[in-house]
């Protein structure tokens, strides 16, 4: 009873059931386009798209042939459904990098070949599809010729280089495709993948030529350097696409495919375009050199200004120290005059304080010596006043002693 409930809860939906029964999930080289046509209306719903990738994540679907069928189907759906492209970018394909576990009866050479195809063809092609999904909106705008409107002229260069990078990534698979098709001439899935990729890259190559024509227009706002760089890239892509087409006998024995378009531009126009780019680059280099010279001059002036500001601030700090010392001297002068017993010790303290203050005062203030001399004069005047008071006191004491002595002599004369 419990097993029946588990089967009910673990049962597949109608969409998953059809997918697992179709030719798209069978471990063979049969690929029916009719099965893809049936799935297309359902692969616009997010839930069905999630279930689509869940089927291919199962362990039973990790064989080389099933992975190839999944890649071919994804490639077709990216150009049809925007919802599929959005969900595709969210899928984690960590499971895809693991090779399938073949039984021991399988020949070792076949397992080695599948591992090589996985690492050198399937994984790079999956990366190409991921990049294609991220730029699906721009790709559709190219195909609908929306980019040729004047309002998009400012973004045309950026869009052209995006498409150019995508085409170069697709063309980087050509050497691996050539090796694979030569070693496995009866692999129908490999031929279908190569044929679909060539048809797509040929459309992109044609679109790049149209974009270059728009950039060469007199009303274009693109710089001559950007136009010339893009012109050279289009030439390189044309040669690579032609190399890809020369392999069509390996994947298109019926010769139904068309050769890539050729860029029609005469040698004189190409030389003129190159000369314009060189002149513009020369102007840019001169402007950079002049700008760097101005920056070096301004930096030197700023450095000198900072040095002068630092010197002034240092003088200001020293002046503050000097004014603080001056204030302490003024406070010391306001204290009451010391007594005779305290005078020697206080004088030593004052002398020590004067020595310490004289060491802290900067040498730049030459007037400090005059101030020190004024302070010494004040101290000498204070000492002279103290001496005068002491001498006056002694004189008074002597007078008093003389008076008392004369009084005593008079008393003795009276008694005698």
Image (cartoon, rainbow, N blue to C red):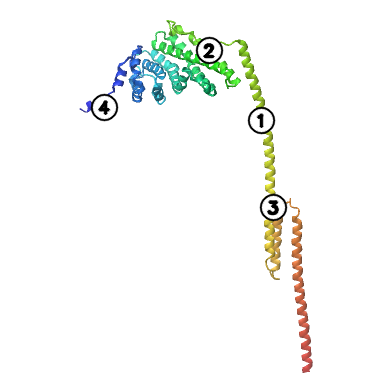
Task: Quote the CA–CA distance across marks 1 and 2.
Answer: 40 Å
Quadrant of the snapshot with the C terminus: bottom right
Q: Mark 2 highlights which residue?
A: 238
Mark 1–mark 2 contact, CB under 8 Å?
Answer: no
Marks 1, 4: nearer the viewer: 1
Check contact, mark 4 vs mark 2: CB within 8 A.
no
| Residue at the image position 74 percent from the left and 55 percent from the top | 368
Q: Which mark is residue 319?
A: 3
Cα separation, mark 1 vs mark 3, equals 40 Å
Q: Could you tell which of marks 1 and 2 lies nearer the N-terminus?
A: 2
**Dot 4 alpha-carbon crowd within 10 angstroms: few under 14, some 14 to 19, many 20 or more:** few
Query: Can residue 104 be seen from the camera position used here?
Result: no
**Of residues 240 and 38, which is closer to you in this image?**
38
Given this view, does label 2 or label 3 mark the residue nearer the observer? 2
Label 3 crowd (10 A; few <14 / some 14-19 / many >=20):
some
Tag on residue 292? 1
* Residue 153 placement, left or right of 45: right
3D distance between C-alphas at marks 4 and 2: 55 Å
x 64%, y 17%: residue: 275
Q: Residue at x 69, y 47 (%)?
A: 312
SS of the residue at dot 2? helix
* Label 1 environment density (alpha carbons within 10 Å; few <14, some 14–19, many ≥20): few
Instruction: Residue 262 in the image: state x and y as whole percent.
Output: 53, 10
Q: Position of residue 310 (x, y in %)?
A: 67, 45
Q: Which residue is mark 4?
A: 9
- Disc 4/disc 3 C-alpha distance (Å): 89 Å
Query: Residue 157, image x and y in percent?
Result: 54, 21
**Residue 298 visible to an observer of this rendering:** yes
| Mark with earlier residue (2, 3) | 2
Q: Secondary structure at mark 4?
A: helix
Q: Position of residue 90 (x, y in %)?
A: 40, 26
Q: Could you tell which of marks 1 and 3 lies nearer the N-terminus? A: 1
């Amino acid at each position: 009873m419990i097993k029946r409930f588990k089967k009910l809860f673990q049962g597949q939906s109608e969409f998953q059931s059809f997918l697992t029964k179709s030719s798209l999930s069978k471990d063979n080289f049969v690929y029916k386009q009719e099965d893809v046509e049936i799935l297309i209306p359902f692969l616009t719903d997010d839930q069905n798209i999630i279930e689509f990738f869940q089927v291919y994540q199962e362990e039973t679907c990790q064989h080389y042939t099933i992975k190839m069928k999944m890649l071919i189907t994804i490639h077709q759906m990216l150009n049809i459904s925007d919802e599929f492209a959005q969900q595709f970018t969210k899928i984690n394909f960590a499971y895809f990098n693991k090779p399938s576990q073949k039984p021991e009866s399988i020949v070792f050479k076949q397992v080695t070949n599948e591992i090589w195809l996985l690492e050198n063809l399937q994984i790079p092609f999956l990366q190409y599809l991921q990049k294609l999904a991220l730029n699906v909106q721009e790709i559709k705008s190219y195909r609908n010729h929306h980019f040729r409107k004047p309002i998009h002229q400012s973004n045309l260069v950026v869009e052209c280089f995006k498409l150019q990078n995508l085409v170069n990534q697709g063309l980087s698979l050509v050497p691996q495709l050539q090796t694979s098709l030569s070693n496995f001439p009866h692999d129908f899935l490999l031929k279908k993948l190569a044929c679909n990729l060539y048809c797509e890259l040929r459309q992109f190559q044609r679109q790049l030529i149209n974009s270059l024509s728009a950039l060469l227009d007199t009303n274009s706002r693109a710089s001559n350097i950007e136009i010339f760089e893009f012109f050279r890239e289009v030439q390189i892509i044309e040669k690579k696409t032609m190399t890809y087409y020369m392999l069509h006998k390996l994947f298109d024995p019926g010769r139904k495919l068309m050769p890539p378009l050729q860029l029609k531009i005469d040698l004189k126009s190409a030389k003129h375009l190159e000369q314009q780019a060189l002149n513009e680059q020369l102007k840019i280099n001169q402007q950079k050199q002049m700008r760097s010279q101005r920056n070096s001059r301004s930096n030197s002036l700023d450095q000198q200004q900072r040095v002068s500001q630092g010197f002034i601030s240092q003088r200001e700090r020293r002046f503050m120290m000097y004014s603080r010392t001056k204030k302490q001297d003024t406070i010391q002068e306001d204290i009451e005059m010391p007594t005779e017993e305290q005078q020697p010790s206080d004088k030593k303290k004052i002398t020590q304080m004067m020595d310490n203050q004289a060491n802290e005062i900067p040498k730049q203030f030459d007037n400090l010596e005059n101030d020190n001399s004024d302070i010494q004069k004040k101290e000498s005047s204070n000492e002279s006043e103290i001496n005068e008071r002491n001498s006056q006191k002694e004189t008074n004491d002597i007078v008093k002693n003389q008076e008392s002595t004369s009084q005593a002599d008079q008393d003795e004369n009276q008694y005698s």
